[in-house]
Amino acid sequence: MLNLLRKDFIALKSSLGVVFLYLAVFSIAFMKIDSSIQLVGIYTAFATLSLGTMIDIKKNNHNFLVTLPISRKNIVQAKYVTAIIYTLFGVLASYGIHSLVKLAVPQLNKPDYSVMDILVPVGILLILTSIYMPLFYTLSKKGTGIINVIFLIILIALAQPTAIFMNMMNDQGFSSDQTLFLIPIGILLFFIASYYLTVNLFTRKDL
């Protein structure tokens, strides 16, 4: 498991410049938008995940890994853990940048950030990952490019709903609606179900 995680980060090491470029470009592009802290985190994390899967496809990593004494379940498990790490990196990096901008450029009138500004993009990314992973492991080399284009469109379309949702959260508060407590549980269950579905699909797949 640890070696599989290490493999992913070694593979991504040569593209770290691209990851930080994503972070810089998205930060500049969205900084003046009210929901910029969420969008920068979501876009950066998911772009990093897409980059990692494209590296797997380009280097035929899965074809090699299945020849080793490693279960396919562990391969999928490592990829989901990696996705969580990418999620935390993107969201926390966005939080750090916005906190610095708030201090350095007060003219932008950035609001005080709360724990919800971290939890909401994490939840959205877990949902996106839960949809993306089964598709990636099912279509793999034949359809990864198409999947990435579709998810790019989804991410673009996600900007406005994210802003609306955050405005609702700020107006109503997290504790004012008990149904909101069920959302993290639902997201977590969806993520777990996605993992088991992906394991099942990848186990049956011929490489």
Image (cartoon, grey):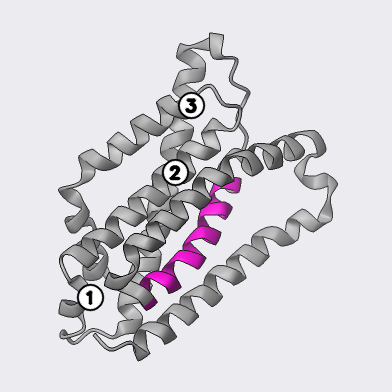
Vertical comparison of 40 with 70: above or below? above
Asked if residue 142 lies left or right of residue 101, the reply is: left
What residue is shown with label 3? 98
Q: Residues within 10 Å of mark 2 (few under 14, many from 20)?
A: many
Residue type at numbered disc 3: His
SS at badge 2: helix
- Reading the image, the residue beneath label 1 is 62
Question: What secondary structure do most residues of the magenta stretch adopt?
Answer: helix
Q: From the image, which quarter does the C terminus lie in? A: bottom left
Q: Residue at x 32, y 79 (%)?
A: 74
Seen from the viewer's position, the closer of residues 178 and 160 is 160
Residue 34 picture location, percent across and down? 61, 27
Can residue 80 be seen in this snapshot? yes
Q: Earlier in the sequence, mark 3 or mark 2?
A: 2
> For mark 2, what is the residue?
43
Q: Which residues are magenta?
A: 120-138
